[in-house]
Image (cartoon, rainbow, N blue to C red):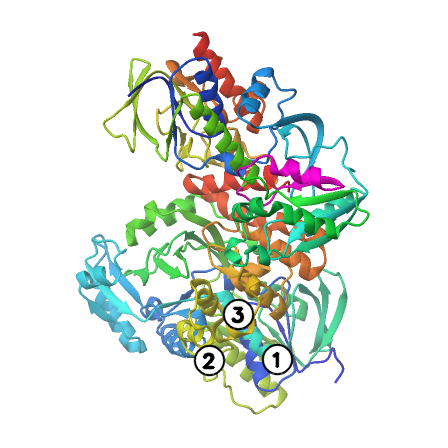
Amino acid sequence: MAPNEFDVIIIGGGITGAGTQRDCAMRGLRTLLVERSDIATGATGRNHGLLHSGARYAVNDAESGAECIRENLILKKIASHCIDSADGLFVTLPEDDLGYQATLVEACRASGISAEIIDPDLARRLEPSVNPEIIGAVRVPDASVDPFRLCAANMLDAKLHGSQLRLHTEVSGIIKEGNEVKGIRTRNLITMEESDFYAPVIVNASGVWGEQICNMAGTRLTMFPAKGALLIFAHRVNNMVINRCRKPANADILVPGDTVCIIGTTSSRIPLEECLNVAVTPDEVNLLITEGAKLAPGLLSTRILRAYAGVRPLVSEDNDPSGRNISRGIVCLDHELRDGIKGFVTISGGKLTTYRLMAEMATDMVCRKLGVDKACETAVKALPGSEDGSYEEVAKKIWENPSTSQKAAASRMGSRVSRIRSEDRRDEALVCECEEVSVGEVNAAIDRLEVNSLTDLRRRTRVGMGTCQGEFCACRAAGLLAKAHGSVQRERKDLEDFLQERWKGNFPIGWGDTLREAEYTQWVYKNVLGL
Amino acid sequence: MRFDTVVIGGGLTGLVAGIRLQKAGKETAIVSSGQNALHFFSGSFESIGEPSRDITELFSESGIRLHYQEGVRLMPLGTFRPSALSLEDISLFPKEKFGNKLLLVNIVGYHDFFSSFLSQGLEEADMSCRIRFLNLSDMGINAPGEMRSVQLARTLDRNWEKVVQEVRLLLKDDDTVILPQVFGLEDGSIPGRIRQSLPAQVVFVGTLPPSVPGIRTLQLLKRRYEVLGGTYLMGDEVVQAHLHEGVVHSVVTKNLGQHYLEADNFILCTGSFFSKGLASTPEKVYEPIFGADVSFPPERSDWYNPSFAEKQPYLGFGVCTDAHLKVLKDHTPLSNLYAAGSILGATHPELGMGAGMCLRSALKAADSILEA
């Protein structure tokens, strides 16, 4: 086989693509994944980071609910270092109909989700940040998941199974012979180099961009992009996921994650052209704060770190332009059966929680097409980093007396943290003080999975995701990246882009402490450092 | 407790105003919350032009040496910026090309001094530059946590002669040595002594905050103020003001509680947003102590420019005053409250910008009090 020939090519480096890449690689296929930007830059990195128990869906969509709980339990085993199993509450406020509680619990039981009605007093004790006015509470096995870490771990495992990953590589065309796909034309957006890659099967896992890829392949797929806005708060106000116990509505889920918590979301249709640069409006910010404070009043006095929005890749399976048949479930299309295009598969819809199942469905389809008969093992084999249980156990195995920053590193990298173990104490110097990320960890990330920019690094290590949002660590990390890439000019531009990206998430919430921090950043970067 | 003037805010502006008033024989107190913008001071007073005698005297009497030369200075990320009045630490050059062969000295394990960015900028300005690293582990600096500007300066101030020796060993035919600004935290003569001890031009370049020359400047101004008999209330903040018919009678502080600070005059120099002189909610920008008038556009979207690199409107918001810097409340000047420093935002363009504006407005407010 020539170096540009593969068994399967996957388009899209979100969690669906990453999961499919891992599954294909584990079944022995020569696999290539191409991504136009960096890993987890689309919907994967722009949501709550909620590992659904399924309770949210159980009432309206029993199938999704059942899929969620099955996958929830699997991921807690195979991706333990990406997951914080805090459990969740569905709380009823005085203005809500307490009757919905029974509906929810019954639906959960039907879908196999453990849902236990608990006394509001107990709920207040379990989760002190919850609105003290609650009149009802149900406990469910929700958890939070770090989507960046999860995505990176899947890709890393694929790499360990011989798969190739090409980031910043845009698909410019699908190569076809008659009604059969043969490969893809690509352009590297950094080097502008054009390359063709060939494979008998191509998997379209490009999320909201699936419509465009289908056009290139000569078929139609109608996407209904739905924007969801969210706010990140500077502290971990809650330890359990807090959901509003009513029909799904705006801003009714508050999820803790690492050092922060996230409230969301809104839902509004947007045109495909706007998907690359979605902005959060003042009305959305107001709504998120008002509704969020009903779940946890402490949010009103907590600094907001950032406003951001993602786009849900909802699909209309039958191409009905009205969107009446939009599916919120998994859509796995065999375009040979659907449109007569041989070797082309689309996997879309679904949820972060069900990514593994989606990947399994897509990979099963790929294997059938290639005539490969090998069972899926992704549900039983742990991801790299998740082999050794909790991060505290991992840290103890390596360090006699782990420091808080060593524990933080172990919680991010799992068992792979041993790779950054160094005899040189200088590698312990902190780059990012908020998240306690060391020089060694940053360098390990640069070595492990291609890092092109500071925002790429942020997705891999949490550098710049904490309270100061990259005030100083951006500069320190830029120094390390300049060294790794040997280009200072590129790094100076990168630093400017990073600050712009940060400001984009800050000015929609630019008051109070956020404005203070913004003024400080302006002062430091423009007047003190001279950017 | 009664004073002639109570100054609210203990940064550059408050100290300069306080020193001026003490020297004129007034009894004053400064209420200082602790940290202020001098901790991030670049060392240059932007846009001030040739300094008045008042300014040079005030600084030299405080033991702070300034120099004035219209030119450029080298910034930590390797860019150049027009500068004039500066602390003596800061090298000012008539043009960007200030040397031919440069030796850039960084410290092993120190990530807050950007030698690669600097060397790129220097090469763009047509100077050749080589980077060398000093290993300070035998000076007892090992712990990664010690690699921050102030911690380094504490050790290096005791060991600066060793550093000079090490640098001498690295020097070949270089005409210039570039060092991080981590010398002279307490003793301001150290940068000058390093310059004298090396057979090449020595240029100190800034690091990530905190700023070593800034902290030294703060300490020296504070010492001078106290030598003149001023009362510097460290770690305290004003929480309430008592006003009656357009006159401020007293202010209440967190630490002093029922012991109000009374005075004939008050100067408000609590800084802008970061220092909490100005506060904001989604609806408004306000001054939290006196409820002074603040100029800002009503629509929040007009507060910002979506591009980080562009000039940000909110940085210009400030407390409204009359021509004597008397603070306006409900469009009417309060008879004995003056505002100075960053809290003015860009409302007084004639006073300049940045630290230069702080100096000028501090002297202007003090003079308004002395002339009244």
- Of the two numbered discs 1 and 2 in the rendering, the one whose residue sits closer to the viewer: 2
Label 1 or label 2, whichever comes before in sequence order: 1
Q: Residues within 10 Å of mark 2 (few under 14, many from 20)?
A: some
Q: Secondary structure at mark 2?
A: loop
Q: Is residue B162 visible?
A: yes
Label 1 or label 3, whichever comes before in sequence order: 3
Res. B255 mark:
none
Q: Quarter of the image containing the N terminus of chain A?
A: bottom right
From what the image shows, is residue A203 above or below residue A436?
A: below
Q: Secondary structure at mark 1?
A: helix
Q: Quadrant of residue A396?
A: bottom left
Which residue is the site of mark 2?
A387
Q: Chain of mark 3?
A: A
Q: Chain of mark 1?
A: A
Q: Which residues are magenta?
A: B186-210
Magenta segment includes B78: no
- Of the two numbered discs 3 and 2 in the rendering, the one whose residue sits closer to the viewer: 2
The kind of residue tagged 1 is: Glu
Magenta segment includes B198: yes
Which residue is the site of mark 1?
A336
Which residue is the site of mark 3?
A151
Per the model, the C-alpha gap separating discs 1 and 3 is 29 Å
Per the model, the C-alpha gap separating discs 1 and 2 is 39 Å
Residue A173 spot, x, y in % from top left: 71, 67
Residue B183 spot, x, y in % from top left: 59, 42
The kind of residue tagged 2 is: Glu
Label 3 or label 2, whichever comes before in sequence order: 3
